[in-house]
Image (cartoon, helix red, strand yellow):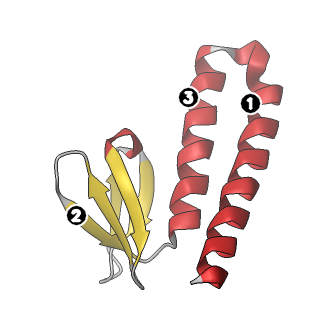
Amino acid sequence: MIELTRLNGSHLAVNCDLIKYAESAPDTVLTLITGEKLIVLEPSSEVSRRTLEYRARTLAAAWPEAATALSAKAAHSAHAIASDIEHKASEA
């Protein structure tokens, strides 16, 4: 689970495996696979980064020998996703 912040400042933990869409309009709206929508303060690039880090930590705990490679991959992927989101936002 990843910790995010509601618009009123309260924190919530979200099962990131349930996130279907993350949209910036201008607030970040998460649509879960259940159809529920959550509005959070963090930009969608941050939600993606936290999701990747969470998954890397989960895999590292299950497969400790791969921890170094997974950490490097998560950092690279988070940077690539953030760059892609920024590029798309600048085109809009």
Depth order, front residue of 34/53: 34
Cα distance, mark 3 to mark 2? 25 Å
Q: Are marks 3 and 2 in contact (CB under 8 Å)?
A: no
* Mark 2, residue position: 37
Q: Is disc 3 surrounded by few (<14), some (14 to 19) or many (20+) residues within 10 Å?
A: few
Q: Secondary structure at mark 3?
A: helix
* Mark 3, residue position: 58
Q: Secondary structure at mark 1?
A: helix
Q: Residue furthest front?
A: 91
Residue at image x 66%, y 24%? Answer: 60
Q: Which mark is residue 33?
A: none
Cα distance, mark 3 to mark 1? 10 Å
Residue type pointed to by label 3: Thr
Q: Is residue 20 left or right of residue 33?
A: right
**Depth-wise, is mark 3 or mark 2 nearer the camera?**
2
Query: For residue 91, which quarter of the picture?
Result: bottom right
Is tag 3's residue or tag 2's residue first in the polypeptide sequence? 2
Q: Secondary structure at mark 2?
A: strand
Residue 23 % position (x, y): 41, 69
Residue type pointed to by label 1: Leu
Residue 34 % position (x, y): 17, 46
* Mark 1, residue position: 70
**The C terminus is located in which quarter?**
bottom right
Depth order, front residue of 70/90: 90
Depth order, front residue of 90/11: 90
Is tag 3's residue or tag 1's residue first in the polypeptide sequence? 3
